[in-house]
Image (cartoon, helix red, strand yellow):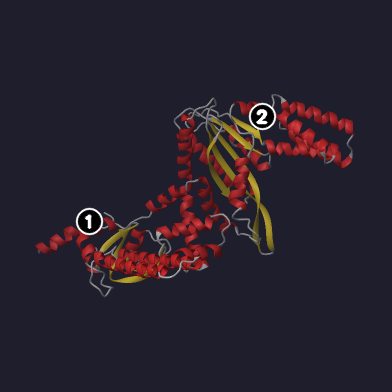
Amino acid sequence: MNYSMYIVGTLLPVLLGNADKSQSASETLGQKLSDIFENVLQATSQHSQDFLSQPVTPERTFAWEHQLEEVLREAGRKVVHAVYNRVEPVVESLPKHVRFEASQYTRLNRKTPQNVWTLFGQVRLYRVGYRPSDKTGDPTLFPAALALGLIQGASPALAERAAGLMSDTGMTQQTVLKRLKQDHGVGWGVKKLRQVTAFLSEELAEQRHEVQVEKLLELLQQATASKGKHKPVLSVGRDGITLGLRIAAGTINEVATCGTVTVLDRRGRRLGTMYLAYVPEFGQGTMSQQLTRLVTEVLKRWQGPLPRLSYVTDSGDNETTYYAKVLSRMKHPRTGEKLEWIRVADYYHVSERLWTMAELLFGKGKRATSWVRKLQKWLLKPSGAYRVLHSAAALRQQQQLRGKKLTDFQRAYSYLRDRLKYLRYADYRAVGIPLGSGVTEAGCKTIYTQRLKLSGMRWKKAGAQRLLHLRVLRVSGVWDQAYQRVLRGIKQPQVAVQAATTKRTAKKAA
């Protein structure tokens, strides 16, 4: 039996009927709460009467709402203080020993205070400590803090709020600290904010894989049940984005990475996307490993018809290598059959090469624009890429390009020629496969640009990755599921009820 269950099941009358010995008043919880609410009623009534006793103005309306907010928040703080300090009854009523992570702890004889920060502000918590029975020097254990789920001294609700703010678009540490002070009356510094963020980032990162797998399976069920002429599609993408890193000599820009796994329904509509993001790393091995792990686990657990599999990216080195060495060789994790991945060269990156060739052939102007628009339409038709290459080659001969212009033209032309088998856009559209990597590129913008690339920002890799762990859960829409798993995973001390009862019985009999 864990510590909390023992208290509720065995000591409930004590818990509700007696006050903490550290407090001067011996009143029940109900009496305490009644006094708090009576004071709130009096204060709100007085503020409201004062407000209505004079002409109403926008300035006085503003002031009155802030007065009311302060009264209600202070009342909430007092309620939290009263309730949290009844989590444990008087010391003598508590078990003498508890076990936690294979070690035994012995109860101290008095409660000690701790500052706890909540959604309503700071409270003082009096809780009982247990020291290691074998005197190993390990830290004192506080079962009440574990039962409450305190995270670096913050309540679970406030810790979630702080980490959530840190992951939000446009936020900085100072902005978050101001919001915590303004909204919750919590006067933290940077050190405390970083402690809470670092702890939750690590804990949430451990839950990311499982909640994303569950979400993708749910999306596949929706896609399978949808109406339309296509098979559901599981589409994978990845892309790179530069990130400013702090080094001793200043700042260096390296390529971070964003990965996506998207589910599209039978009409080709995107139902949802799971995101991954990792700081710059040579070869982007972590991204490849985690992206493969996510896709493999989804396919392993999915019991319905196999969705159509697509890989939509630009043709960067890491993106190309991942397809060649991983996806093109991937086998079904249950059946062992080779999987057929349809690789798509991003339509918009291909269009960029059309613009490059057009400006080299015609210069900037209407003629170049007209030619590109025509070729973009051709690309979307059967065998359209061949027509594009034929037109470009003919114009190159006609314009007789030389020197650097010819070199740049050939580079853009070769980009299309070497990827012909990935430019079958008419075929892709016919089966509901996306033509562009817009989801992944938007992920780069949402995850990195809007949070980690604000003016003047530069990062150490560890600090950036902490925020990326939080950010991907936010944009994937699985933050709440991951956080609930973290809370459920907080271990609780165990009370050896049977052993303790046997000992008391033997002593009584003697």
Q: Nearer the viewer, mark 1 or mark 2?
A: 2
Question: In the figure, 115 relative to 305: above or below?
Answer: below
Label 1 to label 2: alpha-carbon separation: 66 Å
Tag 2 residue: 425
Where 424 sits versus 90, above or below?
above
The x and y percentages for residue 387 are 76, 26
> Is residue 413 in view from this perspective?
no
Image quarter in which the N terminus is found: bottom left
Snapshot quadrant of residue 367:
top right
Please state which amino acid type lies under the numbered disc 1. Gly
Q: Identify the disc placed on residue 199.
A: none
Viewer-side residue, 336 vs 457: 457
Q: Nearer the viewer, residue 383 or 268?
A: 268
Mark 2 surroundings: few (<14), some (14-19) or many (≥20) residues within 10 A: many
Using the rendered view, name the quadrant where residue 264 is placed.
top right
| Residue 102 falls left or right of residue 9 | right
Q: Residue at x 26, y 55 (%)?
A: 5
On residue 9, the disc is 1
**Along the viewing direction, whichever of 484 and 82 lies nearer the viewer:** 82
Task: Give the image location of residue 494, x and y in percent.
Answer: 29, 57
- On the picture, is 276 further left or further right than 505? right
**Is residue 423 something one can see in this rendering?**
yes
- Residue in view at x 61 percent, y 34 percent: 434
Amino acid carrying mark 2 in the image: Tyr
| Callout 2 secondary element | helix
What residue appears at the point 86 percent right and 42 percent down from the top-left corner? 404
Question: Mark 1 falls on what kind of element?
Answer: helix
* Residue density around tag 1, few if under 14, some if 14–19, many if 20 or more, within 10 Å: few
Disc count in the image? 2
Viewer-proximal residue among 280 and 450 = 450
Where in the figure is residue 466, as x and y percent of width and height?
53, 56
Farthest-out residue, front: 55
